[in-house]
Amino acid sequence: MKTKKRLFSMITAMLLVISMLLAGCGSGSGGASGNDPAKASGSGDGTKAATEGNAPVGDPVTIKALFVTSGNTEDLAAVQDAINEILIPKINCRLEVQFSNMGSAQQQINLLLSSPGDIDITFVNGANINGYVRAGQLLDITDYYENASEEFKSVFPESYYEAARINGRMYSLTVNRNFSNPTVFNVNRTLADEMGLKFDPDKLYTLDEVKALAQQAKEKYPDIYPIVPQTGNILVAQWTWDGLGDGNNLGVLENYGQSTKVVNLLDCQDFIDFCKTMREWYQEGLIMADATSNTEYFSTYFNANKAFGAINNMTLANYDPEDPNATMYALRLTENWTKADMLSSLSYAIAAGTKHPDEAFKVFEELYTNPEICTLLKYGVEGLDYQLNADGKIDFLEGQDVTSTKWSAGWVASWALPNWEPGPLTYSMKDGYYENFRNYDATALMSKGVGFCFDTSKVTNEYTACVNVMDKYYAALLCGSMDVDETLPKFREELKAAGIQDVIDEKQAQLDEFLSSNGK
């Protein structure tokens, strides 16, 4: 069991960070199809099932939904049947499920939304919501929300429903997940324990203290990397500046988003200071020398005991340094805060082209509130894909783990489904697991731009040109492999020539409009 728990902890941590970067690869898997309600419900008589539970008599309405996951969905037909055994008697709807990998989802979503009737409910990336709304491809669900059940309205705090509105109207709803995190310095637990290191989970550590730890590790373990990038060539994805839903940081808010003035990242003092510090560390051999060509996630090096530490973005809501199954320690480096796009970057919406808007919203509500349906989407069918242990918690079937189960959507990416909370906990989750996230989020410093997503359509050429410049310098500066004083002037000039000021001006104008329309 200990080996199993370690594997789960490792894979979950890995996929959480990769997911915040929206990275991934692979092809989507199509859902079960067909319009026979009897087959879909697994009841043998779809019309009869619809008459039970005081549901309206008649053929169930088929609602098609697209979800995203990097997990295995081999038992899709069985999961879909089980969901429809719930939906048909209750609301006279049947769900036709499709799954896509995060890396290939965007193209699939664009195609589905461009053809009315091809999809009813779909995952949407926050960076594209403005474009979809502008093109009339998402249904305005404001009135549906106003008349929704209190259960649906209480999934999130009221401010969360309001945060992602566009011109005062609601077009999507965030997935239920963690919405805040600090930046931390993760330390390889095996190596730290060997070194006799002790850490204070309540302390805010300085970069000087991190440097001292990395120096100790280098002295004791000269053949390992003291510090490796968070993932790929990115030393850390988030520090104290807020890119306003723009992962390229072309125009940011400083000081955890507490300012409403959009500035050039290169004029952000925290960015300059951070890069200069990393340059010092790099020259002292504390950062992986070939970091700019790295392709691995940091836990890969931790698991092989080839690295001591990494700067990471990690929620501490359920962090327990005494957990014997934990593979790393977390030293907090920044405030716990909520970036602008945390309530909109991963969402679900109803397609404007749906032929059944009323029924689609009924299913939409069930996806966020029904514990049985949420559990089916996360862990599959009991007895087929998982079992309940003596504590009533979800566990793998005997002899299986996250790599061999035929349904792992919830094990590896529950945060990508509409609501990760309802239903039983898994064996590795302590009681109060999800309440801890809500309580932790409630303490977060919220960016002034929460809910805002930048629409680049008016500055497409300038934005693309600036991204090309960022690709030349940004990651290398963060990793310390370029001299800051020599590089920044060139970086500034090239961004200026590419049109950075036009991008910043447009982002500022959109932010001002967003703040005004939302009464901020």
Image (cartoon, grey):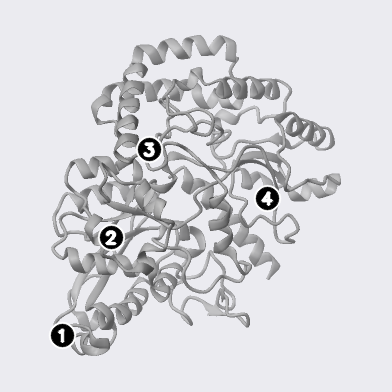
Q: Residues within 10 Å of mark 1 (few under 14, many from 20)?
A: some
Residue that lies at the very extreme toward the right in this rendered image: 196
Q: Can you tell which mark lies on residue 145? A: 2
**Distance from label 1 to label 4 (Cα)?**
57 Å
Q: Which residue was labeled with disc 3? A: 520
Q: What element carries label 2?
A: helix
Tell me, yes or no, if residue 44 can be seen here: no
**Distance from label 3 to label 2 (Cα)?**
22 Å
Q: Which amino acid does label 1 sit on?
A: Val
Q: Is residue 363 above or below residue 296?
A: below
Q: How crowded is mark 2: few (under 14 residues within 10 Å), some or many (20 or more)?
A: some
Residue appearing at x 51%, y 76% in the figure: 386
Q: Can you say which quadrant of the picture contains the C terminus?
A: top left
Q: How crowded is mark 3: few (under 14 residues within 10 Å), some or many (20 or more)?
A: few
Which is more N-terminal, label 4 or label 1?
A: 1
Pick the residue in front: 499 or 97.
499
Tag 2 near tag 1, CB within 8 Å: no
Which is more N-terminal, label 1 or label 2?
A: 1
- Residue 366 image position (x, y, % from top left): 33, 70
**Distance from label 3 to label 1 (Cα)?**
47 Å
Q: What element carries label 1?
A: loop
Pick the residue in front: 268 or 193.
268
Q: Which residue was labeled with disc 4? A: 303
Q: What residue type is labelled 3?
A: Lys
Q: Is mark 4 on a helix, strand or loop?
A: helix
